[in-house]
Image (cartoon, rainbow, N blue to C red):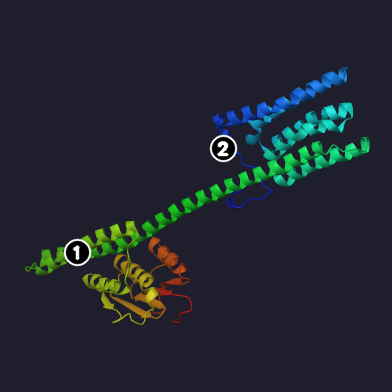
């Protein structure tokens, strides 16, 4: 089967019999088809009754080798390389057609039904189907040239085997390709769900753990330097709330029911930035933002603010929103070329899903800038 498009069948493709690697699956088909070879016994009897001499003995040997090659092809052919398949089919046609050539009789070409069936099994249908019909046409032409009379039942046997077996194998290969396509879809669905869970957990835990670290540091400093522990207790209560919220978000993420709100993320950003001693300039309302963008823009604010808390020495952070865009800037020090981490990569994927795009890097006035815009939006 084609690895590039396992759901599409083509007559140009070599038949895939990978399941043939299991020897137990080969036994029944080989035995059944071996019994089918019993139809050659009457042919051998006719040769013995009507013919004599060395040619008769050679013809009988050829039929014996033909039968052995057919059984060998059934057992080994489906798992053989392409060149070996061609050799096997060629040998079957050679030995199967030997009696007809020895006795100059096209009637014996009917025995090539087994060779045609094996060709359909081992070769691409674009070659094996024409080969079968060409054999039938050759028998017909030989009959007309030899006696002027055509035994249509014999010609029909070759053509019928080609049409029937070719159709069966085409359906078999198509079903196999559809099974492969379904398996690939299942794998892609699993991979997609893993990426979703990983992305969401990164967004949740990255932001919440960064906020917790800031609040823990603030509570520690208060306990170390202040006589009044009330502010520290307030920070601890916030930490407890964040822990419960994180657990709830993780459960919702795993179950697939977690929703992100831009307003809630702005509120959380205000608390986190305040705890870190960063002056926050946030929009008073998000009513101007298109409702369908609140979720993805909430992720943008969450990730950008998390980066401010974790990586920046900024003293000021500004968030601006519009109908189809959101911008987060800070005045921190940016050294070198900032690299996109897992969070920003995840944001790029989220925005790509809505035909939007993400910009991030050094801002025009210094600091770091994250800008997300949906398709068609004007900054």
Residue 90 seen: no
Please name the residue shown 54% across and 48% down the image. Answer: 180
Looking at this view, is 46 or 28 the one in front? 46
Please name the residue shown 46% across and 72% down the image. Answer: 356
State whether residue 212 is above or below residue 59.
below
Mark 1 and mark 2 lie on one chain; the one further toward the N terminus is 2
Question: Comparing marks 1 and 2, which lies closer to the viewer?
Answer: 2
Give how far across and how far down residue 27 sits, in percent: 58, 28
| Residue bearing mark 2 | 19
Looking at this view, is 324 or 304 the one in front? 324
State whether residue 203 is above or below residue 372.
above
Give how far across and how far down residue 334 sits, in percent: 37, 70
State whether residue 221 is above or below residue 170.
below
| Residue bearing mark 1 | 241
Looking at this view, is 329 or 190 the one in front? 190
Residue 108 seen: yes
Give how far across and how far down residue 168 sits, in percent: 65, 43
Q: Residues within 10 Å of mark 2 (few under 14, many from 20)?
A: few
Give the secondary structure at mark 1.
helix
């Amino acid at each position: 089967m084609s690895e590039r498009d396992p759901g599409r069948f083509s007559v140009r493709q070599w038949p895939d019999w990978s399941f043939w690697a299991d020897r137990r699956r080969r036994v029944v088909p080989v035995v059944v088809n071996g019994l089918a070879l019993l139809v050659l016994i009457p042919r051998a009897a006719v040769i013995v009754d009507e013919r004599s001499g060395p040619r008769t003995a050679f013809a009988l040997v050829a039929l014996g080798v033909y039968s052995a090659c057919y059984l060998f092809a059934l057992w080994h052919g489906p798992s053989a390389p392409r060149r070996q398949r061609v050799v096997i089919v060629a040998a079957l046609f050679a030995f199967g057609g030997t009696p007809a050539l020895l006795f100059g009789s096209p009637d014996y070409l009917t025995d090539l039904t087994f060779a045609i069936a094996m060709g359909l099994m081992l070769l691409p249908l674009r070659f094996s189907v024409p080969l079968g019909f060409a054999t039938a046409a050759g028998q017909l032409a030989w009959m007309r040239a030899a006696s002027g009379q055509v035994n249509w039942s014999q010609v029909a046997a070759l053509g019928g085997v080609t049409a029937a077996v070719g159709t069966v194998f085409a359906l078999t290969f198509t079903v196999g390709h559809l099974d492969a396509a379904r398996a690939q879809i299942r794998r892609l669905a699993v991979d997609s769900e893993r990426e979703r869970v990983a992305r969401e957990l990164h967004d949740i835990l990255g932001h919440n753990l960064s906020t917790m670290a800031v609040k823990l540091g603030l509570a520690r400093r208060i306990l170390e330097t202040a006589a009044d522990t009330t502010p520290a207790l307030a920070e601890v209560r916030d930490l407890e709330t964040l822990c419960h919220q994180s657990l709830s978000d993780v459960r919702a993420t795993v179950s697939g029911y977690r929703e992100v709100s831009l307003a809630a993320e702005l509120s959380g950003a205000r608390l986190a930035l305040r705890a870190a001693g960063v002056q926050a300039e946030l929009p008073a309302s998000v009513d101007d933002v298109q409702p369908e963008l609140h979720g993805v823009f909430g992720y943008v604010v969450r990730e950008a603010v998390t980066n401010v808390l974790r990586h920046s020495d900024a003293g000021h952070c500004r968030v601006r929103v519009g109908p189809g865009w959101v911008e987060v800037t800070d005045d921190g020090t940016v050294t070198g070329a900032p690299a996109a981490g897992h969070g920003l990569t995840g944001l790029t994927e989220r925005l790509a899903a809505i035909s939007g795009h993400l910009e991030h890097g050094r801002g025009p006035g210094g600091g770091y800038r994250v800008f997300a815009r949906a398709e068609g939006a004007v900054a």
